[in-house]
Amino acid sequence: MLHLILQSVEYKNEIDKIKSKILNEEDELVKKSLMLTIFVLSESYVSSLIVSNLPERDENLIDKAYEKIIQQYISKNIRTRNGRKELVKNFYNTDLPAIPHTKLRDALAHEINKVDLKNNRFKYDNSRGNRNENIIEVSIDEIINELEEWFLNLEFP
């Protein structure tokens, strides 16, 4: 399970440090990699938040087999975007706000060469199936501001 609980202050500090590095970096590939790091930190933060706020389970009342099933369910779902949404819905009875610019995150993770970066502005395909129907152009500052807004609006339990 997740051992390190990334606290909100740590998360914000890390994002600020990476943002500064991005804005001072010249190399395009390094900038893209640092942006991906911000997305990964955001996912880690929300995973930590989910796990750290799960309800306590009394081991005396829950059979070990059931506890193992619960642990496996959590471990499996904490790793994916849809899984985290499901965990929040099932354990906290609320919706998990979507992380902004997940298509950019996915493109940086899987097709970094298809993401353009010029003058601190990312340009990427936000359409289904990479059809170039919905090209998004957004500044690094806008992305980070939206991620910070997302972070501030996370409320559960």
Image (spheres, grey):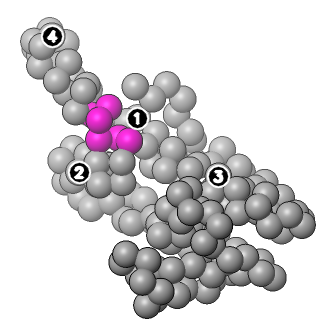
Kind of residue at badge 2: Glu
Q: Nearer the viewer, mark 4 or mark 1?
A: 4
Kind of residue at badge 1: Ser
Q: What label does residue 52 carry, if any? A: 1
Circle 4 residue: 64
Of residues 15 and 26, the one drawn nearer to the viewer in this rendering: 26
Which residue does the image show at 21% across and 23% down from the upper left? 57
Disc 4 element: helix
Q: Of label 3 and label 2, which has the lower sequence position? A: 3
Residue 105 shows up from this direction: no
Q: What is the C-alpha distance between the residues marked 1 and 2?
A: 16 Å
Q: Of label 3 and label 1, which has the lower sequence position? A: 3
Q: Nearer the viewer, mark 3 or mark 1?
A: 3
Of residues 128 and 154, the one drawn nearer to the viewer in this rendering: 128
Reply yes or no: does residue 109 show up in magenta: no
Reply yes or no: does residue 78 show up in magenta: yes
